[in-house]
Amino acid sequence: MENTPNNNLISDICDAISTGYNFGGWTDPLDESPLGPAEVRAVRNNQQDKFKTMTRNQSNIDKFLKKSRQKRINAQAKDDRRKQNTLRSR
C-alpha cells in the first residue's frame, strides 16, 4: 500500500485554484476588481450586438413564414383556376 496517492492532493489543488494561482495559463487568476470604462463599453456593445442579431434573425424568420404562406395561397389559387376553367386548356 505504499503506492496509494496522497488524498490531500485534490484539496491542495482546489485550494490553489481558489486563491487564484495560475497553472500555466489554463486557469485564470481570480480578479474581482471593478471593470474599467473600456471594458464596460465593450460588454455593453457585445450585449447590444447580441440583441440586434437576435432581432434580425427573428425578423428574417417572420419574413420567411409570411412569404411561404403567400406562396402557398398563390399556388392554391392557381390550382383552383386550372380546375375550374377546363375549356382554356384545349
Image (tube, rainbow, N blue to C red):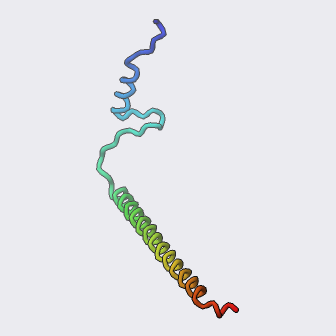
Residue 62 rendering spot, x and y as whole percentages: 44, 72
The foreground one among 86 and 59 is 86
Q: Is residue 81 left or right of residue 31?
A: right
Give the camera-side residue of 68 and 77.
Answer: 77
Tell me the residue at 29%/50% (across/down).
Answer: 34
Kindly indicate the quadrant of the structure image that contains residue 78.
bottom right
Number of disc labels:
0
**Residue placed furthest toward the right:** 90
Image spot of residue 72 (x, y percent): 52, 77
Taking 38 as reference, is 26 above or below it? above
The residue depicted at 37 percent of the width and 28 percent of the height is 14
Frontmost residue, 21 versus 17: 17
Residue drawn at x 60%, y 91% is 85
Q: Is residue 9 above or below residue 55?
A: above
On the rendered image, what quadrant is the C terminus found in? Answer: bottom right
Q: Position of residue 30 (x, y in %)?
A: 35, 39
What's the residue at 38%, 38% (across, down)?
29
Q: Is 89 left or right of 68, judged from the image as shown?
A: right
